[in-house]
Structure formats: structure tokens, C-alpha cells
Amino acid sequence: MWAGSVPQVYRKLEKQEVLNFFRFVQTFPENTRLTFKTQHLLQFLNRFYSVHHQGEGAMNRVPLQQPQTCGPWELKERLGTGGFGNVTRWQNKDTEEQIAIKQCRQELSERNKERWKLEIQIMKRLNHVNVVAARDVPAGMQKLVTANDLPLLAMEYCQGGDLRKYLNVLDNCCGMREGSVLILLRDISSALTYLHNKRIIHRDLKPENIVLQQGEKRLIHKIIDLGYAKELDQSSLCTSFVGTLQYLAPELIERMQYTVTVDYWSFGTLVFECITGFRPFLPTWQPVPWHNKVRLKENDHIVVYEDLSGEVQFSKHLPQPNNLNSLLLEKMERWLQLMLMWSPQNRGKDPNATPTDCFSQLELILKLKLVHILNMMSAKILTYSVADDETVADLQLRIEKDTGITAASQELLLEAGLALEPHVPASQCAVDYSEVDGRRRDLPLVFLFDRSSCTYQPQFAPRTLPENIRFVQMDPKHVLPYSPLRRTCGQAWHTIRSLKEDWQRLQQGQKAAIMSLLRHNSSLSKQKNEMVSMHQRLTAKLEFFTTSLHIDMDKYQEQTATGIASEKLMSVWREMEQTAVSCGQAKVSELEDEMMQLQPDIVDVQRQPWRCGEALDTLEGKAMELFRKLREKPRDQRCAGDGQEVMRLVLQAVQVYERKLKDFYTHLSKTAVCRQRVMELLPKVEGVVQKMAESEQILMSLQERRQKELWNLLKVACSKVRSPVSGSPDGLRTPSSVPPLLTPRDSLQQIDESLLEESRTFESRLQSLLHTTIQESESSMEMLREWTWLSGEQSFSSDLS
């Protein structure tokens, strides 16, 4: 098989020979000495892998030399070129519609030509939002573009590029954001389920075969290249085999029979990379040693990596750093253990779980409604999965178990300072990533405060540093190869960025506390205005009542000598006067002074003297620039180095964070004190307002009682003069006159003329007094009707009613 010179072997190498040799080498004990030619062939395989592996995802867009048109369609750019052919982008000048045209190379066997035509037919039958859609090839383009009879494949154009391009963004060096990961899981799992139901196995799922399209609310992921093009010819097969080794299931590499579980392995590998920023199984190793080492992993191992000391480690946990919350992290670890089992018979199944298959379990994960609570006492984020019928009160009981803060003492605030009511559904705080762009940096949070405490002590427990950073911290001068050094620099930048984002979340919590304080202070100001207004109204009514009462008492004293005298009436009026005075004894001025003293402190906490984001921004910028320069080095300049500089930046960031955290919590304590003072004043002011409202009612009842007593007095006075008198029979029927004094008929003739004259004089005085009293009463009621300026829309007369 291996006869001939080594260069001839290179030239005659076919994929089946590569696979056979690969399987043959696997059977050798590791200490077996290989022949000279076999060693060189293995070196060739390794070099061949390295070239394709380093160039993976490098299908750069090629600028066009000359413009080309086909009717209204204009060629814009070449999107990619590979072993299968090329893909170009065309745009319709009239409708601005864009399509991608996939063209295959000419060197195809008849069998592979039929496979290519079959792929086009299948693509046209598929209809799923997460599978790229086929389009009609514009008329005339077949003859213009191709020099053979192979048909073109027209597809919708996705302007977001492929997932590899997105993963290569600097921000994703340690994995994508949590929201982006969840959206990817939802889209690709839906697409794979659709394809598998159609009895289609992709077999080549990788970031290069997932493209991004901007939807109305979020990014949409679409699968391309359904695995037919990679089987078109021998050289293309070999390229595909080497270039995508990390995503190929072991049974494909070993040329064993396979099922849909090959897509499980590829999907799990892809998801792991999206979470962590690197592939799970020795991503820089070459094919033969890679296969020999990874096959030793156990079923629950989801990562095999080489640490900085050169030891190969196996782990069943997702490595740090990543951007998943603790609850989701645990669930994704269990799911990845199913997807990355070496045995295809066991892969994707969990007989001990319900449901047992991986996609049903993933669906349960994606349906979780997660609420993120930032405990401002400890600066830690708590994540809870809430049910549809779970209320905030139910959630508070769970928080109480985790934090020790009683439900009665908890205050849950949104960023705008609004407090969550206990009876509302807790799910209203959950994030719906189907409606939100998952690339957002800010995580929607609920901020937890302890009402029972006004003293916040910094409880800084630094983030667990990544393994590489801890290694460099122990030995900063240790020289690292380029690839581990680049990853260590990326982790250092991610660590500093995470500290900055932790700080920003604390600032959001402080902002929420200040907004809540201002809301309560606004309520206090409204209560104060109402208290002052009511106090002015009460004072005016009290002054009017006491003045009227004194006039009544003075007038009463004037007529006692010749009119009616009643000590009981005077006693009642004096009692009314004492009651009225007690109604005006509200402590309004003391409360006003206390509120005025509080306002400067509230203004002071809004100045935020504890900002330190600028320092962390500077350190993050330096770490990012260091990482960027290292990553963009030309291949011939990539050399080993130490991590002293990045370690120094990480330590500075931690020191800045710790130093400023103390000032932050001092300021947060001031905010809590101001809030407590406001909350203590609110019931006091409400109590005074309530008391004044009651006093106003009492005063009104006194006024009504005074009027009744006055009319009773007039009634008594009238009763003394309402008897019939001889000589004036019509006098009783005159409503405007006072009847003559009562005199017996049989003695009327004996009365002296002077006594009769005196009686008439007394009658005239009493009538005049009655008329004056009636006028004063009418004037008093008229004045009461004009008190609308004191009581708003309700008049005094309506209060009486």
C-alpha cells in the first residue's frame, strides 16, 4: 500500500487511504516504533491538518475585479471559495432583493452530479425559518455564470455572516452572552428537529454552516449546506475530513455506521464552543493523538484540555470563564453530557430522566422563566426559575431561605425604582429572549434590599479567577506557548470586563435605590403640601368660628340685663371654645422643619461621589488592546511569552474594585438612612393630616351646634312673647310681628296705661333683636358658602350637610 517514495505517496493520497491509515495507527500501542515512511506520512497528516485547521473559517470575501450583471441582477461580491466551488452575492437593482448563488466546480463524476441535483431538489422542498430557503435562479444566470451543465443553487442571502465570524468577535473570546447562547439553542435545535423529521442528517454542522439573519426583534440563525457538497469528490472529502475534525462524531471518523446522533455530537461541540469560546476536546491537537486521547474520556466528561503545565485534564463541568448564570450552567452541563457521549448508541439519551431524549430536555431548559435577583447586601446574583402561577410573595419565601432576609424585610426594586408588589406574578420579571436581542450586555435584574437594615457592609468575595490566570499568578514569569498565552490574555480581559460589569450592576442597584427614595420623597412632599394646605384651611375656619363665638358671647352679655339669661348656654359656648382651640394644636411646624432638614441629604446622595468606572474602563481598554494585538499577530511572528503584563492589569482591577466598594457601600448606607427617614416621616405626616381632617369635622359640628343653640335661644325668647293680647285679635296671624305680652282678660281693664306702653316698648326691642339675629345668621351662612377657596371643590355648606 505504501510502496514508492514519500512524495509519490503524498500525491496519490486519497481520502479512503487516509481513513484506513488513521484506523490502522489507532491499533498500535503508544510505544510502538513506526517505520521511517510511516512516520513521515503521520507528519504529513499532522501538517495537513494544521494547515486546514488554521485556515478554518477563513473563507474571506473576495473583492470583484469587474462588475457583472444579469438582467436587473448585479454581482456584488464573492462570499466564499472552497473545495466545493464558490458562493456569490447578487442584488436586484429594481427591488433591492439579495440572493446568494452557489456554484459547484466542474470536476465532478456523474454520480456526484446527480447528488448535487438532488440537493437542490431537497433544498427547494424545505420550508423552515431556521433553514436557509432556496430561491429561483434568475433567468439567464445559468448560462452567464457556469461553463457546464451543473445547475446553480440560489438561496436567500443572510447579511449577518456566519457564526464563525460572530464567534471571532473580540467580545466573544470567552463565549457568547447568555441570551445569544439561548437564542442559538432555540433556533438550531428547531432546525435539526425539522431536518431529522424529514429524515435528513446534516453530518457537517459547524459554525461555518450557520448564518445569521437580523429579524424584527432579534437575530435568527439558519443552517446552510445540508451535507451533500462535502461528498461530491475525493479531494473535497479529504478537506472536509481534516478541516472539521473537531465537529465530526467519532463514528464518522472511524467509518462506522451512523444515525442522527452524529448531529448530536456536532451540535454539542458547537454549543460548548459558543459558551466557552473554544472547542471542548484538545482543540490544538493533531488528528491521531487527538483521537487516541479523547476516546479515553468517560460518558459524563464534556471537556478534555491541556493545562498550562502540560497535563491533560478531563472534566464534566463547563470551564470558567463563561457568561451563563449558575442555574443555567448546571442544566447545560447535564445536557452536554448527553450530547458528547462517545458511544453513538447512548448519545442523546438519559434513561433516568423524563423526557429521555436530548431535544425534549433542551426544550424544557429553553422554557425556563428565569428571574435574576441582585442581592445588594452581598453583591451576588441569585437566579430563580419561576412558574406561571408563582407570585412575588412565593419568590420572596425562596429568597428568604437563600439570604436569611425575611420576606417582610425584603424590598424588590426594578431599575426604575418601582417596587414589586407581592401579589403580582413573579414571571413578569423574567427575560423573554424571543422578544429581546440576546447580544445585550445588560442583564435585566431585580434588586434586593433589606428594609430592616440601614448599614451596608462590603462583603467582597472576588470572582473565582480562571485556571490560567491562577497559574500565571503563581508563576508570572512562566513562558507560555502562543496559543495558551493568547487564551490567558483573553481570560484576563474577560475578568476585568466582568469586574466592570459587576460594578455597573451595583450602580444600577444604587440608581434603583435613589429612584425609590425620590418616589417616596415625592409622596412625602405631596403629603406635606396637603398637610400645609389643610392646616391653613383649618386655621381659617378655627379663627372664623372663635370670632363668631366671641361675638355671640358679647351680644349675649349685652342683652342679659333686659333679655334672656342662661348659665347653661354660656357653659356650652365656653366648652365649644376650648374644644375648638384643641383642634388647632397639630404639630405641623415641627414636621416641616424635619422635612426641610432631610432634603439636603437627599440631594447629596444623588451626586454619586463613589464613581470608579473610569479606572476600570481604562484597565479594561489596556487588557483588550493587549489581547487584540496578540491575536492579530502574523503567523510567522507568533511566539511564546509570559503573562506578567496581563496579570498586573488583573491585580490592579481587583484592587480598584475592592477599594471603591467600601466607598460605594458607605454611600448606599446614606441612601438607606435617607429612605428610612422618609418612611418614618410619611406615617407621621399622614397621621397629622388625618388628625386635622378629624379636627375640621369636629369644628364643623361645633359650628352646627352653635347655630342650633342660637336658634334655641331665639325660640325661648319668642315663646315668652307669643300669648294672645286683648284688643289685637289679628296680631297672632301677622308673621312679621311679635305677639303682645300675655295678660288675663278679666284684669286687662285694670292695667295702667303706662304699663301697657312699657309692654309695647319691650315688644319692639325684642322684635328688633330677633331681626338682627336673623340677619347675622344669614350673613354667617353666606360666608360659609364662600369658603370654597379653603376647601377646594367642596363648600362649607356641603360639609355641613
Image: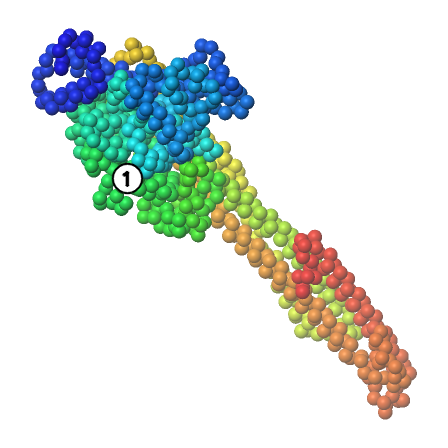
Pick the front one: 363 or 146? 146
Residue beneath the point at 90% across and 85% down: 727
Q: Nearer the viewer, residue 27 or 417?
A: 27
From the viewer's side, name the closer residue of 478 and 331. Answer: 331
Residue at 27% x, 46% y is 354
The answer to whether one can see residue 697 in this image is yes
Q: How is the image coloured?
A: rainbow
Q: Is residue 44 left or right of residue 504?
A: left
Disc tally is 1
Q: Secondary structure under badge 1?
A: helix
The quarter of the rendered structure image containing the N terminus is top left
Task: Give the residue furthest to the right.
Answer: 753
The residue positioned farthest toward the bottom in the image shown? 746
Task: Give the image location of residue 483, x and y in percent.
Answer: 27, 18
For the question of whether residue 53 can be seen, the reply is no
Determine crowd level at label 1: few under 14, some 14-19, many 20+ residues with C-alpha closer than 10 A. Answer: many
Q: Position of residue 650 (x, y in %)?
A: 32, 24
Can you say whether 769 is above or below 25 in the image? Answer: below
**Residue sitting at 34 percent across and 48 percent down?**
398
**Kind of residue at disc 1:** Cys
Residue in front for this viewpoint, 615 or 706: 615
Q: Is residue 443 left or right of residue 554?
A: left
- Percent x, y for residue 82? 34, 17
**Residue at figure coordinates x 29%, y 22% from the top left:** 111
In which quadrant will I find the C terminus?
bottom right
Q: Would you name the residue on which mark 1 appears? A: 358
